[in-house]
Image (cartoon, helix red, strand yellow):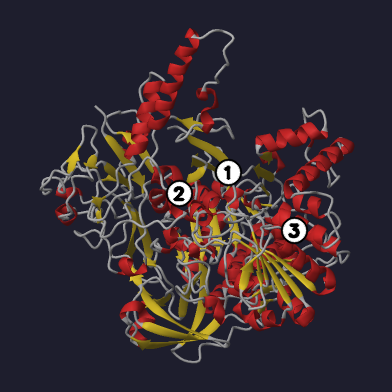
Amino acid sequence: MTRWGMAIDLDRCTGCEACVVACAAENNIQTVGEEQAREGRAMHWLRIERYYEGEFPNVRTRFMPVLCQQCGAAPCEPVCPVYATYRNPEGLNAMVYSRCIGTRFCANNCPYTVRVFNWFDAEFPAPLDSQLNPDVSVRPGGVMEKCTFCVQRIQAGKDEAAQEERDVADGDIRTACQQSCPTKAIAFGDLEDPDSEVSKWAESPRAFSLLGDLDTRPGVVYLSGSEWREPAE
Amino acid sequence: MSGNDRKRGEPRVTIGRRDFFKVYAAAGVAVLQGCRRRDEEWIESPVRRSAALPGASVWRRSICGQCGAGCEIEVRTVDRLAKKIEGLPEGFVNAGGVCALGHSALQELYHPDRVTEPMRRGSSGELEPVSWEEALETAATAIAAAPDATTIVAGAPSGPLLGLWRRFAATVGTSPPVHWQPADAVVEREAARLACGESTRPAYDLARSDYVVSVGAPCLDRWRSPVHLGAAWAELTADRRGKLVQVEARHSLTAANADDWLPVRPGSEGFLARGLAGLLLGSGTVGEEGRTAYEALYPGAPPDVAATAERCGIDAGRIERLATELSRARRPLVMAGGSALEGEDGVAAGAAALALNLLLGSVGREGGVFAGVDFGFEDRLAGDAAAALPPAALADRLAGDGESGVLVVSEADPLYGMPGLDAAFGGAGTVIALSAFFDDTTLRADVVLPVQTDLERFQAVEPDPVRGVPALLIASPTVAPRGEARHPGDVALALAAAAGRALPWPGFQEAVESALSDAFTATRAAGDDASDPAALPPSLIAGALNARQFVRRTTDAGGLLGTEELRRAPTRLPRDGGNDMPSALPDPAARAAPVGPAGVESFTLIPFESLKLGDGRGANRPWLQELPDPLSTVMWGTWAEVATEDADRLGIHTGDIVRLTGTVAEIELPAIVLPTVRPGCVGVPVGGGHADYGRYARGRGINVNALLSTDRQVAGAGAFARGDLRVRVERLRRPRRSERPVIYGRGLRQAEEIPVGWAPHDGGKA
């Protein structure tokens, strides 16, 4: 059985945010405007967290892309009164938009703060709507949404493989954020396949889970920790 | 969906649900065909023309034109509408990556407030729609009446389109076009000419270096080619093989990612370079050739480490450690750019930094600095026309042209970049703008000629030479143009024809093809003579029977790509007085230290270009406006970065409105207090405060360029100086609700710091 997973190498991430815009373009994520953004209602499915270490002048800044961790034991799922969010057989923490009644309990229970709520119907003034991705529904007001691991790309990849009468190969399916990354800091694939790139990255001694002590069993693995050392003479 | 198994330029087709029904229907027709008599009319199966199927995805190769980097992209189109931009995996520059600005080209294309029809200022003083013929006639009449008093401002990157504007100027009889470009680009060229001997922006082999000192060059921010340099940085630091040291007063995104950040006092970068040279010369590790070459440029004694530390405002130990590590590195590299080159002394600082490569033996060596070479298609289109003028020449031209003057501005917004030109603009007789938006300059135009955006136009681009490998990238339009928008090159040619001075080509594409044809002929004629500047490397024309076939093959292949073999060291011109190369370079260490701050409220202003809005171009895209700045996390506005230490002293809190007072203007904006700012400095992003530029940019944020003065220029470069500007900072008030900066509020709920695995590994040696 497939378990879709992602690995993000923080040592390669520059915080350039190309992934954030790629995600918005791929997934029809609305922009809410200055006033609503000020109220904390921006809709990004993927954000870059920034952390400081040390003090001036020896201060370091670290960046960390944070998206839905597609948890194996997702805190968001059991609190939904209408089963709008569930775990699918391939490890995706999926959303059924038409079931969601907007209680926002799931967002409240997500320790990663990656769920966003449509306070209003999305607006894409014409002809900006010409850009919308026909493979992804535009979510109406009152509905919760979040990263899907580009499920439409997963489906397209499986369809393509089926058409060619073969299995999905590692690398066939690339999420929008992964595709866009200039430094190739993101790997995506099947965590159950020991030969996949994402599995190899996850085996790194630098790998860790975000808020791992909560035991949410995330499908996203982070890599961090190496420092430059002067080569030996 | 894999992009790796496609051939270059080959459309990628996927079949969706709707297509399935089409195919299903077609299959039915095919079955029925079998039942029909042979003499019945043949109905072509739509499957064979699948690229045109409704709902099918067609991927088309294009070139991102959002900056001069020349990233090759694939655009997903469905029903002839552009849906998504992705990097072409085999892209010459970007190898599959795209930056935030590149993605947002879609929102430029489909912006609801685009100019899509020609306009002319009517008797009421308002711009009114007119036909192309009327608009061109008005513009051409004005130009033909006073070619001597006509000034052209071209915003296109260096390459064929700029060459066409040069040819236009020479043919119509105007002065050479003013090339509106970033200040540090002009300064970097001049610094490279002085230090390395060749007047092009240098190429940096970041990926194969093992120790890179970037003197101000914001190589991971919006500078030259962010995607290529980002990938090269990743290669440099993979497995922590190499190290990046950023020397820059501001904690830019590059500084944030560097292994070491040296927050030197603004304007002291050149002094640091000279101080490092002193330490290297004294270390005994410098080769005789490097020492001779360097000391010929700088015959004076370099400053000692104590003086360097004092002037730069950093610890002497850090400078010594930097020099030691540089001297021990196998393939060291020193880059120069950005804020280090934007002060009045920018050329001297840049040359001093680049000259360190001579000392280190890094010129023309793997992992070092190379010449920024190209195939010369700008000059090929320009013919004998004079070179373009640097940006600051615009001030002189405007002053000289007076009321009879005509100003032609193509894809540039000089009034936004230098608001100090406002009064001179007011004196111009006729302003003709080629633009896709009502930016600050276009608002003042008498004639507006709508131009196509990247994805709508035929493209021929020579990418930024940062790789050191020449290329000419060509792409056909991806989608049909909106409204009546035309290619700016075609508009230039139509203007010349309407003015009675037609150029020899009907359109820009034909001009490029003609240049390609001429290049083929010259290459054939040159044979093995590699010294002919008009000839291309012979391998590029191998296999082509004639010029026509070469042109077709080149355009079909997406351009001409050079190889690593064409990478070369800069041509070291002799400094014997026979040319305009100076025998010795201005020594930044010989300049007196700038006068210290007058009081605790006096700061050095550091305007910077963020990855979001760049020089302001990105401000009309909602994706970019709502993108949190990676360092300050601010969305939708402009802010002032203030150091924690200064904020404590002045009683400034994040969000407070502060006033920045310069010599020519003052601006008010919210402060963001950050622990990463060098005390005494205040950073403000460029990009906000447009007068119009569409609904997402109009009146949003503040234009920090208002603080710049046309009088302050970088010595010897012809660029307006943006750096080392002293401003007074005062706290005004707590912000009103509508003034509060929009700070991205999300974060991990459970922790202030990432709790797991975050501390650097000690490798078992600590």
Badges 3 and 2, same chain: no
Q: Amino acid at mark 1?
A: Thr
Whole-percent x, y for residue B719 in the image: 68, 72
Mark 3 nearby-residue class (10 Å; few <14, some 14–19, many ≥20): many
Q: Is residue B172 above or below residue A168?
A: below
The residue that appears at 55% across and 47% down in the rendered structure is B207
**Mark 2 lies on residue:** A131
Chain bearing tag 3 is B
- The chain holding disc 1 is B
Depth check, front residue: B14 or B93: B14
Residue B431 visible from this viewpoint: yes
Taking the image as drawn, is residue A204 in sight?
Answer: no
Give the amino acid type for the residue marked by disc 3 in the picture: Ala
What numbered label is drawn on residue B478?
A: 1
Q: Kindly identify the residue that appears in the image at 57 percent across and 40 percent down.
A: B61
Where does label 3 land, which residue? Answer: B492
**Residue A133 locus on image (x, y percent):** 41, 44
User: Please, which residue is most extreme toward the bottom here?
Assistant: B598
Name the element at disc 2: helix
- Vertically, is A132 above or below B714? above
Quadrant assignment, res B194 = bottom right
Q: Secondary structure at mark 1?
A: loop
Query: Does residue B692 appear to the left or right of B296 in the view shown?
Result: left
